[in-house]
Image (cartoon, rainbow, N blue to C red):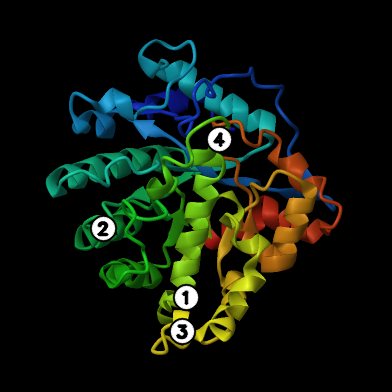
């Protein structure tokens, strides 16, 4: 790991978020540093593709209400911790989990902002991400922020982020305030991403149309709404022919791809059973379920059986490690992969870091 004092110099304005879980951040003390991962006598570099952070510079541009955008952090006044504390905690967490690199992103909080504000927020966010990653390339990579409500502007930010700032792609929601990414107006973003070889990380923000039904006990807006939003997003990209139009597009789906990998075969029968509910002008090049083998999925599925099934459905080459850190969904990601008996050592090494390394070019 990098020297922590050096890291502090290059991370002014950074603070890591808990992805919206009340009281989640800083809930537990990190364990002792874990030994490097070795499989078959070979050192495996572990890469966590699903982690979150915010920056003061981009948040404050949102005006007087900016603090409301932050997840509440238990026991920390005004939702903040000091720079030293936050970075030391992040590094300690990585060491305890056996994670060598984290890929940072921020859940979009700017999709409702007007053009100039969204432009400024994403610019500030991406420049800060690039600053941290450039200073510490062994510990951090990042997905850029894009103002997706303005696709032409999103293309500009993607080009700058990848070609000039060295970011690895972009993080987007599951939709833009309920508008699906399969819509024609977003195609220029996918076209440019394909040309740049940029990874598009889809991280859901629940299904706003179901907000009322998802209320109540259990945080269902996240537990049900988030995987459902990802499922809809992926299914739309498949059914609407976007993945045929841009076959080289690199898409990484959070939370194991939502519900789609668990029931993908049903989609193969829809247009046969009910052709009146399908568009005859859209003729897919292969069965809907087969498109899963060209997408990527994080391994945040909690159990060995869940990971076994995900790999059986999409292939071990399409699965990468992801924790949602610092939200404590998966605090033992290495053990999760190593403890899945159905995986070979080669598959374990690929999921822990090899696949992500090739996908992101790190």
Q: Position of residue 87 (x, y in %)?
A: 48, 24
Mark 1 against mark 2, which lies toward the viewer?
Answer: 1
Q: Mark 4 vs mark 3: which is more N-terminal?
A: 3
* Residue 113 sits in quarter: top left
* Residue 346 sits in quarter: bottom right
Residue 82 is left or right of residue 100, and the answer is left
* Residue 121 sits in quarter: top left
Q: Which residue is mark 3?
A: 276
Q: Residues within 10 Å of mark 2 (few under 14, many from 20)?
A: many
Mark 1 against mark 4, which lies toward the viewer?
Answer: 1
Q: Which residue is mark 4?
A: 325
Label 3, label 1: how many angstroms apart (C-alpha)?
A: 14 Å
Q: Position of residue 138 (x, y in %)?
A: 53, 42
Q: Is residue 346 visible?
A: yes
Q: Mark 3 vs mark 1: which is more N-terminal?
A: 1
Q: Mark 2 vs mark 3: which is more N-terminal?
A: 2
SS for callout 1 = helix
Instruction: Check contact, mark 1 vs mark 4: CB within 8 A.
Output: no
Instruction: Check contact, mark 1 vs mark 2: CB within 8 A.
Output: no
Q: Residue at x 61, y 74 (%)?
A: 289
Q: Residue at x 64, y 39 (%)?
A: 99
Q: Which residue is mark 2?
A: 154
Q: Which residue is mark 1?
A: 239
SS for callout 2 = helix
């Amino acid at each position: 790991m990098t020297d922590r004092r050096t890291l502090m110099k290059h991370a002014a304005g950074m603070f890591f978020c808990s992805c919206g879980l009340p009281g989640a951040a800083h809930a537990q003390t990190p364990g002792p540093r874990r030994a490097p991962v070795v499989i078959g006598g070979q050192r495996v570099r572990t890469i966590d593709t699903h982690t979150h952070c915010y920056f003061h510079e981009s948040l404050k541009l949102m005006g007087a209400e900016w603090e409301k955008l932050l997840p509440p952090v238990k026991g920390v006044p005004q939702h903040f911790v000091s720079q030293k504390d936050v970075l030391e905690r992040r590094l300690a967490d990585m060491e305890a989990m056996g994670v060598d690199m984290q890929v940072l992103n921020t859940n979009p909080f700017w999709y409702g902002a007007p053009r100039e504000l969204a432009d400024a927020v994403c610019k500030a966010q991406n420049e800060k991400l690039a600053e941290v990653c450039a200073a510490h390339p062994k510990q951090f990579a990042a997905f850029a922020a894009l103002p997706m409500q303005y696709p032409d502007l999103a293309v500009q930010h993607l080009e700058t982020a990848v070609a000039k700032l060295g970011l690895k792609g972009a993080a987007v929601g599951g939709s833009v305030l309920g508008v699906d990414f399969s819509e024609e107006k977003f195609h220029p973003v996918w076209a440019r991403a394909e040309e740049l070889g940029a990874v598009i990380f889809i991280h859901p923000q629940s299904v706003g149309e179901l907000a009322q039904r998802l209320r109540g006990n259990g945080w269902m807006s996240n537990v049900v709404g988030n995987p459902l939003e990802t499922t809809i997003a992926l299914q739309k990209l498949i059914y609407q022919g976007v993945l045929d139009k841009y076959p080289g597009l690199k898409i990484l789906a959070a939370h194991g791809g939502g519900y789609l990998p668990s029931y993908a075969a049903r989609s193969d029968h829809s247009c046969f059973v009910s052709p009146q509910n399908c568009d005859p002008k859209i003729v897919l090049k292969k069965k809907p379920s087969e498109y899963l083998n060209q997408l990527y999925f994080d391994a945040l599925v909690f159990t060995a059986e869940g990971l076994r099934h995900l790999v059986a459905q999409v292939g071990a080459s399409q699965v990468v490690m992801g924790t949602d850190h610092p939200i404590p969904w998966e605090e033992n990601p290495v053990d999760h992969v190593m403890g899945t008996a159905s995986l070979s050592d080669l598959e374990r090494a690929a999921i822990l870091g090899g696949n992500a390394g090739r996908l992101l070019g790190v």
